[in-house]
Amino acid sequence: MSTSLSSHSTPRVAGESPIAEPVGAKSPGAVDSPAEKGLASKTAAGSTARKASKLRPDDGRLARGRRSRARIREAAKSLFRERGFDGATLRAIAERAGMGASSIYRHVQSKEELLIDELSEMQEEAWTRFRALDDRDRPTADRLREFFDVQHDLLVADRDLTTIALRATTKTEARVAKRVLQLYDRTIGLLMEILQRGRIKRDLAKDVDVLETARVLFHVTHGARIPWANGMVSDDALRDSVHQAVDLLFRGVSADSRQV
């Protein structure tokens, strides 16, 4: 009598004990059902989602750091105006910003550094305002005077902070000194951009060094602000001094110089 074997039975050799298959094990060549594939996919997706939920690249520290520094800057500006630079200690700034006295050092190293931040923002605002008013086809000397006028208006509008900032730039702390040099270079670069346009329009002599001219303009105007900051000259006198420096540079001082 013949015996038929089902497709799921496994033949055994005589005398051999049966081998129990693990629960859920598949026969060689077996194919997962759609339901099994879906379950495996969901399991893998769930595992990936759980891992992703635990991964936070910076744990929010960068965002919190920016918010903390913004609070510190606002606190510093208000205290500088209320108490003056000398009367506004870092401890008081930290308290006004809502943080511990030691915590502030994770964000800033000195009061001078905070002032440099404000000076940098003022510089950027001056350039933005100048751009809004600028006509690149105007004579170069007029464009330079316009830029210095915009800068002057911002400095005068915040005289106390400007005076403190000018004094702070003489400090020798490494971080502050580096920031000051960066600001100087940035201003010189802006002046170079105006002068370069003047060279293209032939407002400048062909052999003029644009970089050196920008440096001279910067140092002359920066130096003119020192007596103003010490109350020795008025706001209008400072503006006139800067205009005269621009005119003098373009006219020249030698007997055989000619208007360019």
Image: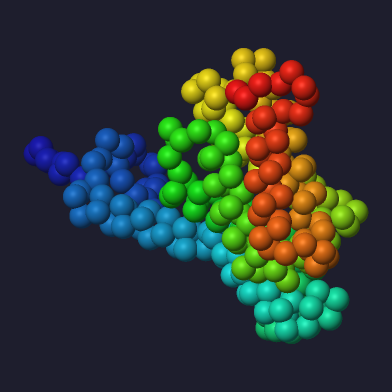
Q: Tell me which colouring the rendered structure shows.
A: rainbow
The answer to whether residue 5 is left or right of residue 117 is left
Which of 105/115 is in front? 115
- Give the residue furthest to the top: 206
Against 246, residue 251 (above or below) is above
Residue 115's x, y, as percent?
74, 64
Residue 68 visible (yes or no):
no
Which of 31/210 is in front? 210
Residue 230's x, y, as percent?
83, 65
**Image quarter for residue 246?**
top right
- Give the residue furthest to the front: 255
Picture residue at 62% right of the left edge, 15% below the top? 206
Q: Quadrant location of the N terminus?
A: top left
Residue 99's x, y, as percent?
71, 81
**Image quarter for residue 258?**
top right
Picture residue at 31% right of the left edge, 46% below the top? 26
Which of 72/62 is in front? 72
Residue 26 visible (yes or no):
yes
Number of marks in the rendered image: 0
Against 188, residue 47 (above or below) is below
Residue 216's x, y, as percent?
75, 35
**Image quarter for residue 42?**
bottom left
The answer to whether residue 3 is left or right of residue 137 is left
Q: Quadrant location of the C terminus?
A: top right
The answer to whether residue 78 is left or right of residue 233 is left
The answer to whether residue 194 is left or right of residue 15 is right
- Give the residue furthest to the right: 172
Against 177, residue 88 (above or below) is below
Against 170, residue 218 (above or below) is above
Picture residue at 85% right of the left edge, 76% below the top? 86
